[in-house]
Image (cartoon, helix red, strand yellow):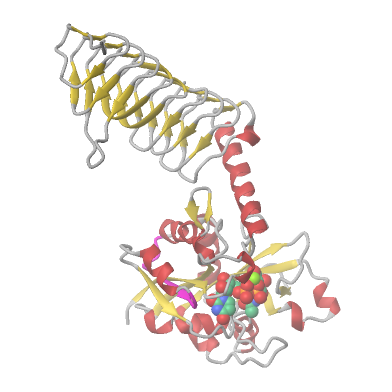
């Protein structure tokens, strides 16, 4: 009997409150989808297999997981409840023994550490562990009926709860870990005899206790288990993520002059002693090295900024921008798929794309690398110490040699030798 760790991610709900043609779990927070946040957690805990249970819009989710060898889709044609959804994953399971962790596709921030604690609790009692939290406003969450410290008797859903039970603030996040054979044995006993007429996953807790199987509660913070059901929730999740990541960066020695105005991505990497001025936006794939300064109103994605470099104000670094140590990128400069050597400067109003710029080169105001001929992209190489005069057009493919000078206003269509002066002017 194959043994392994399986994660089942429930995502068959309609997500109707999103009012979206896009599947709910494919909406983004901090630059990646809710589903990718959850999948990252499954990776962090080393899950052997992940099954995503979907209903409508199955093909969108299939497309999103393409290329991930250990992630599969199970189809729950009719949404008859969370217990029914887990059963829909059964045929896709590679492991009949081992452990299963049930997660929700719209609960993006549960950390690997928390899941590790949950697994340990399930393993230590050879039973079921549920992730609970103290809700400020328990609303319609399922209530956890606990007896001793960490020992759970049952979960009662809001609709089925008495007013006394509704007064309980200890709530079910929905995330559960259990031994795989025990989970499916308990699920086979779940009925839909309740207020919603649904097969509740949460009934396995009471069923476990009546078979003498233990159930424990592992505690998480409410922030960690927040779910996304609407655009308002999506914005709240984004805000929670941003607040957390800003705090982490500042704790690690990054200066944020106006923290609330800076927007990070899930994978932003910033070294200590970087200064970030107000109103800076980070897309995916940004690395900023020590002592760099990102000035106000800059937008960065898919780029590396070397130590001591200064970017902005009002600069745009697009994917493939690689800015050398102590280089300077000034206002209204766009850099795409281009590397600038140490100390190189492009201080004003330029586009540098598909290019390499050598150490100490100076790109004058208004310089454009004309990289696109309408069909293909071409490269521009600018040598070390070269000086490109203002308002020059470098028509790629073209090379400007080391220490060469291009006079202001030139349109360069042929390569310029090292150390020479190139000057083209219309009559
Ligand atoms: C569930 C829990 C409740 C818990 C709450 C936390 C049950 C019975 N109740 O309630 O104790 O406090 O989550 O948010 O489990 N889904 C499917 N197929 C279905 C039904 C649901 O895949 O047939 C998915 C949904 O897409 C969603 C998740 O399961 O990701 C939870 O479903 P939802 O209907 O939101 O459950 P709640 O009523 O909120
Ligand atoms: Mg819900």
Image coordinates for residue 42, horizontal then vertical, percent: 44, 61
Residue lying farthest front?
427
The answer to whether residue 99 is left or right of residue 107 is left
The answer to whether residue 235 is left or right of residue 53 is right
Image coordinates for residue 85, horizontal then vertical, percent: 52, 81
Image coordinates for residue 343, horizontal then vertical, percent: 35, 14
Q: Residue at x 36, y 78 (%)?
A: 95
User: Is 15 drawn above or below residue 231 in the view shown?
Assistant: below
Image coordinates for residue 35, horizontal then vertical, percent: 48, 62
Q: Looking at the figure, which quarter contains the C terminus?
A: top left
Task: Dividing the image into four quarters, tell me where ligand 2 lies.
Answer: bottom right
State which region is magenta: 46-56
**Membership of 55 in magenta stretch:** yes
Q: Residue at x 49, y 76 (%)?
A: 56
**Membership of 350 in magenta stretch:** no
User: Is 388 drawn above or below residue 221 in the view shown?
Assistant: above
Residue lying farthest right?
163
Is residue 86 among what the camera can see? yes
User: In this orientation, which residue lies closer to the viewer: 411 or 206?
Assistant: 411
């Amino acid at each position: 009997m194959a043994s392994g760790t399986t994660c089942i991610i429930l995502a068959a709900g309609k997500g109707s409150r999103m009012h979206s043609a896009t599947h709910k779990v494919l909406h983004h927070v901090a630059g990646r989808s809710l589903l990718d946040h959850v999948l990252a957690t499954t990776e962090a805990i080393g899950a052997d297999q992940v099954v995503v249970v979907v209903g409508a819009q199955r093909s969108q989710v299939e497309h999103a997981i393409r290329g991930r060898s250990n992630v599969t889709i199970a189809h729950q044609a009719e949404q008859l409840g969370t217990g029914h959804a887990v059963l829909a994953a059964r045929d896709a399971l590679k492991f009949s023994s081992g452990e299963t962790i049930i997660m929700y596709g719209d609960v993006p921030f549960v950390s690997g550490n928390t899941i590790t604690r949950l697994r340990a609790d399930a393993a230590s009692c050879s039973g079921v562990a549920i992730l609970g939290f103290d809700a400020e406003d328990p609303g319609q969450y399922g209530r956890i009926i606990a007896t001793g410290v960490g020992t759970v008797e049952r979960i009662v859903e809001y609709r089925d709860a008495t007013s006394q039970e509704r007064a309980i603030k200890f709530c079910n996040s929905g995330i559960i870990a259990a031994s795989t054979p025990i989970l499916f044995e308990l699920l086979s006993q779940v009925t839909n005899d309740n207020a919603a007429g649904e097969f509740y996953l949460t009934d396995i807790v009471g069923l476990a206790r009546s078979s003498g199987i233990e159930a424990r509660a592992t505690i998480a913070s409410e922030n960690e288990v927040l779910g996304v059901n609407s655009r308002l929730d999506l914005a709240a999740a984004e805000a929670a993520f941003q607040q957390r990541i800003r705090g982490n960066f500042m704790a690690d020695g990054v200066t944020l002059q106006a923290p609330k105005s800076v927007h990070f991505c899930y994978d932003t990497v910033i070294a200590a002693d970087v200064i970030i001025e107000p109103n800076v936006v980070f897309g995916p794939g940004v690395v900023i090295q020590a002592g760099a300064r990102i000035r106000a109103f800059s937008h960065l994605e898919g780029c590396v900024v070397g130590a001591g470099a200064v970017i902005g104000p009002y600069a745009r670094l697009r994917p493939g921008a690689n800015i050398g140590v102590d280089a300077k990128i000034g206002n209204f400069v766009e850099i795409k798929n281009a590397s600038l050597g140490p100390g190189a400067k492009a201080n004003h109003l330029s586009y540098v794309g598909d290019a390499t710029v050598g150490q100490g080169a100076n790109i004058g105001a208004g310089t454009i690398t004309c990289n696109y001929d309408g069909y293909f992209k071409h490269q521009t190489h600018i040598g070390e110490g070269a000086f490109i005069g203002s308002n020059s057009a470098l028509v790629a493919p073209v090379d400007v040699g080391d220490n060469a000078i291009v006079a202001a206003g030139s349109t360069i269509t042929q390569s310029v030798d090292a150390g020479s002066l190139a000057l083209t002017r219309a009559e």
